[in-house]
Image (spheres, rainbow, N blue to C red):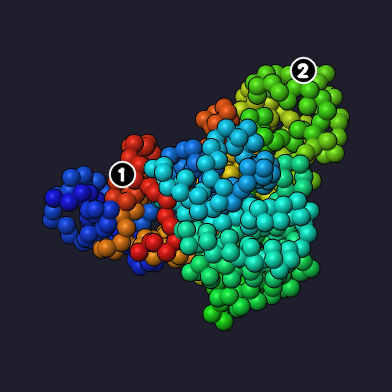
Amino acid sequence: MTDIVIRGGVVVDGTGAAPREADVAMAGGRITAIGNVPERGTTEIDARGKLVTPGFVDIHTHYDGQAVWDSHLAPSAWHGVTTAVMGNCGVGFAPCRAADRDKLIELMEGVEDIPGPILHEGLNWSWESFPEYLDALATRPRDMDICALLPHGAVRVHVMGERALNLENANQADIAAMRAITADAVLAGAFGVSTSRTISHKTLKGDPTPTLRAQEDELRGLAQGLRDGGGGLLELVSDWNTPDPATEFAMVRRVVEATGQPVVFSLTARHDRTEAWKEVLALSDGAAAAGLPIRPVFPPRPIGILLGLEGSQNPFSGCASYKEIAHLPAADRAAAMAEPSRRARILSEDRISGSNFPLISRLAFERMFPFGDPPDYAPPASASIAAMAAREGRRAEEVAYDLLIADGGRGFIFAPLTNFADYTLSASAECLRHPNAIAGLSDGGAHVGFISDGSFPTFLLAYWARDAKEAVFPVQDMIRRLTSDTARAAGLHDRGILRAGMKADLNVIDFAALKLQAPRMVRDLPAGGRRLLQKADGYVATIVNGAVTYREGVATGALPGRLLRAGRVA
């Protein structure tokens, strides 16, 4: 007998090799055989006509808080993810002195839209240093494995205090201290360090992230700390405009050349700088050709905001007459907004100047769409609110208003911010043609009130290997991108491929039935906090460390996941 045998599935092994029919056996948390398996398993899974794949590895998540209080890392666990890398974008909760806790919470709240009350109640702060934070994470079993990056924002505040928040340059003593903290974190198990250089990352008060203007010698010091500790990943987000993409990229390249540490960076196709992403993509391809590990991570669909009365933002959140009722439950707000007098007042007020949402000025009705069920992430321009208004002879604001209050205020408006400049997913398709580019940026665990992108893995597979309007890619290549490609980028060499001896993390997927459900708002966070969650159909089973964690999308109760420590993964 063996632990689990998956029978007769279509094995897509994560290497990019063609699918083949085979059984897969596992025991003791490892794959033991692939082929014709005569032994019976204690658990048998009939996978005839289904895909059998490695578990998905998501290298861009923000479960830094949720992993402290929750053993079920939804929504990522619902989308085939068996390993998640968290601590991206330079934000996190360690190292942290007691006096700085509010600062780091305000930064996480502003950058990743995780409300402060949730974090204040959910975090037990049983740590100060990053190694102590890892020890705290290691005490809780989970439904997936997690890896942690050291957040530069927390390190900078820990070393420089108010000088970090004032964006002062680090001196040589500061850099030496940050280098030592980074080395200690890697020795304790951090998989790398993350940083942010974008003006869109701000605290709840609107202050920029403390890492925004970190100089080259500071970034080099972090990378040297990675090398001192045994090696690790430098993850960064940048606007690529200081002063231009080539200059910023050259700085990153020099850091890699000087330290030998790999870099991954977020790459999105902005609608206001439609060519910049192509330049950065070409620069990264050039670096790869020269043997330098600098890889972009791109989204497989538009990064878009869901605007609604149940969410944290809507197009009228900044209007004075809306703010008067903003405290009401969504259904009561919808009823109040339907009153003719309040409707007239809200529609007559300035919705921009009174808004505390930094992205409000980038939201145009030409790129806002009704968000239905099933959700459509690539709607035509003719479906926009502006186009609807033109056909109906009304103001776009009126159409948006009516969409918000329909169905008791439960509806959403989809507003793509990136990767949809030409109303197609051609930018994502172009990145998929580049082997150096990594598919990711799900932000699982973050943006709980207005973004639901933890479903990226499901979308990548269902859309780009089956439903795409732009180009359909081989299913084995999309599985490779979700498994071995991301695992290797993170420094995980024991997973991502179905092979005897590899870790027993797998998915059994009904590919024909694979689809996303509509996001819904639930209240299941600490302090009664709410979040957008999105499930999927088609996941027959998910297996982590040789234990079935989900069957048909329902948790089994098994919690075999653990904290992974860099340098201790076979």
Q: Badge 2: few (under 14), some or many (20 or more) residues near its Cα, within 10 Å?
A: few
Q: Say which amino acid is labelled 1.
A: Val
Q: Say which amino acid is labelled 2.
A: Glu
- The structure residue drawn at horizontal position 54% and vertical position 53%, both measured from the top left corner, is 130
Is 6 rendered above or below residue 568?
Answer: above
**Left of 50 or right of it: where is 114?**
right
**Mark in the foreground, 1 or 2:** 1
- The structure residue drawn at horizontal position 59% and vertical position 37%, both measured from the top left corner, is 119
- The structure residue drawn at horizontal position 21% and vertical position 44%, both measured from the top left corner, is 43
Residue reaching furthest front?
Answer: 173
Q: Position of residue 153 (x, y in %)?
A: 66, 54
Q: Secondary structure at mark 1?
A: strand
Is 526 rendered above or below residue 177?
Answer: above
Q: Please state, as top left, top right, bottom left or bottom right, where the C terminus lies in the image.
A: bottom left
Q: Quadrant of residue 104?
A: top right
Q: Secondary structure at mark 2?
A: loop
Q: Earlier in the sequence, mark 1 or mark 2?
A: 2
Q: Tag on residue 339?
A: 2
Is 284 rendered above or below residue 273?
Answer: below
Q: Position of residue 195 (x, y in %)?
A: 64, 59
Residue 349 shows in this picture: yes
Q: Tag on residue 66?
A: none
Between residue 500 and residue 36, name the one nearer to us: 500
**Left of 168 or right of it: where is 436?**
left
Q: Tag on residue 548?
A: 1
**Left of 150 or right of it: where is 392?**
right
Between residue 58 and residue 139, name the one nearer to us: 139
Q: Quadrant of residue 402?
A: top right
Between residue 401 and residue 561, name the one nearer to us: 561
- The structure residue drawn at horizontal position 86% and vertical position 31%, both measured from the top left corner, is 349
